[in-house]
Amino acid sequence: MFKHALLESVKAGIADPAQAALPLRARVQRALRQLILDGALEVGRPLPASRALAQSLGVSRDTVESAYSQLDAEGFIERRVGSGSFVSQRAQRLPGSGQSPPLQGRSVARLSQRGGAMFAGGGVRDFLAPRAFAPGVPETRSFPLATWERLQRQVLKEHGTRALLHSPPQGMEALRCAIADYINLERGARAAPERVLVLTSSQQALTLCAQVLLDAGERIFVEDPVYHGARKAFDAAGLECVPVPLDDDGLCVEQLLAASQGPGATPRAVFLTPSHQFPSGTTLALDRRLAVIEWARQNDGWIIEDDYDSEFHYAGKPTSCVQGLDPHARTIYIGTFTKSMFPGLRIGYMLLPPALVAPMTVARTLLDGHSAPIPQLTLARFIDGGHFGAHVRSMRAVYAQRRDMLARLVREHLCDYLTPRVPAGGMQMPCVFIRDIPERAAVDAARRAGIDLQGLSALHASGRQGAGFLMGFAAHAPHELEAGVITLAKVLRALCR
């Protein structure tokens, strides 16, 4: 006789809201399987006849028969002609297994040192919705979606089912050609299609650089403050970040050179955001660019150049990239379309020295294999047709107005708490505290009020405090910026009482 408690357990399993989307036969089968796994139905135990169990559960006999058949096929029960169904010997639990808590109940999983470091670092948080003042989020409401849809239809018409296959791991040739042409013209790069590696993001590029170029324990120069995504990629790879401070001309190269002569192994790479430093907004001066290139030549080092939002420069033409000045092929140039177009595109790229193309491409296959062909081919047409350049020019004007609006609003409503450092380009503005305000508490309180802010102090690799906020303005219309600033003023007023 099936015990009342076991019958109730099966009924509870069938009624579990988490299983509601499953067919009834699957819910019965899973409920019985769990009783066997838990040891409530021990090995050799007879199960009720399918008709009897169906009556007890209020389901059809076919439902129970289907559940029994699946349990039999999986080895949980044995069905003996003329005798009935029994819990199989194959379901014998390991000794002591009943004492282990279920996986979902464990508070700590055993991780590798690398896994533990990645988890402790918290990953890189993307701002999923464009709430004020999420940094690095572009305006997507003005994107020429109809043009994109038309170009995508052209791709599907021309390529047909071939567009549904894998992309080469280095990326579709059409897009690599379009990227090379664009950065040669607009960024002064030394690019060729065979040196472009198409990726899903600049973060993937940073991870590849950290893992392919350096070994755990080796040192890398980073700007101070530094882009948090880069630092977390380097930390996760076990690298030692050596912070180099900034001034109005960007990275203090003389301190980099002095550190290279000091005790300990010379760092083998330097990470730069030279066109528009993250988060300060400074531009690396020409003499310092040339000095970094010479440092890389003399020390057989690598320059990792992240050109994350150079399209949006509001005072004259942006400075040409470091890669285009480097005659020694020591610079890895990283670009992305996430900020210049829309985050959901998930296309970034690296322009690599010839010697790194094959190693980086092979390493990329271990991460995700390839990027989706249809968006790549559509983007290639978008660039070649002049639509990308037109969109960037349009957004450059919009973002410049929004930058100026945010600076005015901060000075008007937040002058008791913050001072803006108006950048010459980019999509976010650093605003520094002018009084003692707990940054972490302010960021948390603002988030509860519907505002997303990036704290500045956590971006200092040296531990130096530069408290304040990094405030994004690109995705927000003037009235949205004003509403956000007024809300932030209320948050800071409450904190400072």
Image (spheres, rainbow, N blue to C red):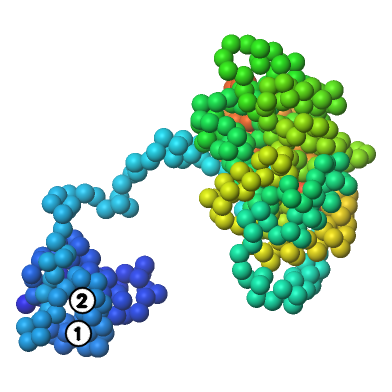
CA distance separating discs 1 and 2: 17 Å
Residue at position x 38%, y 40% in the image: 111
Tell me if 210 is positioned left or right of 354 in this view: left
Residue at position x 64%, y 62% in the image: 167
Residue at position x 88%, y 52% in the image: 393
Q: Position of residue 423 (x, y in %)?
A: 81, 35
Q: Position of residue 360 (x, y in %)?
A: 62, 44
Q: Position of residue 476 (x, y in %)?
A: 76, 51
Mark 2 — residue? 72
Tell me if 425 is positioned left or right of 212 in this view: right
Of the image marks 1 and 2, the number of the one nearer the N terminus: 1
Quadrant in which the C terminus appears: top right
Q: Check disc 2 and report its element: helix, strand or loop.
A: helix
Residue at position x 84%, y 51% in the image: 181
Mark 1 — residue? 54
Q: Check disc 1 and report its element: helix, strand or loop.
A: helix
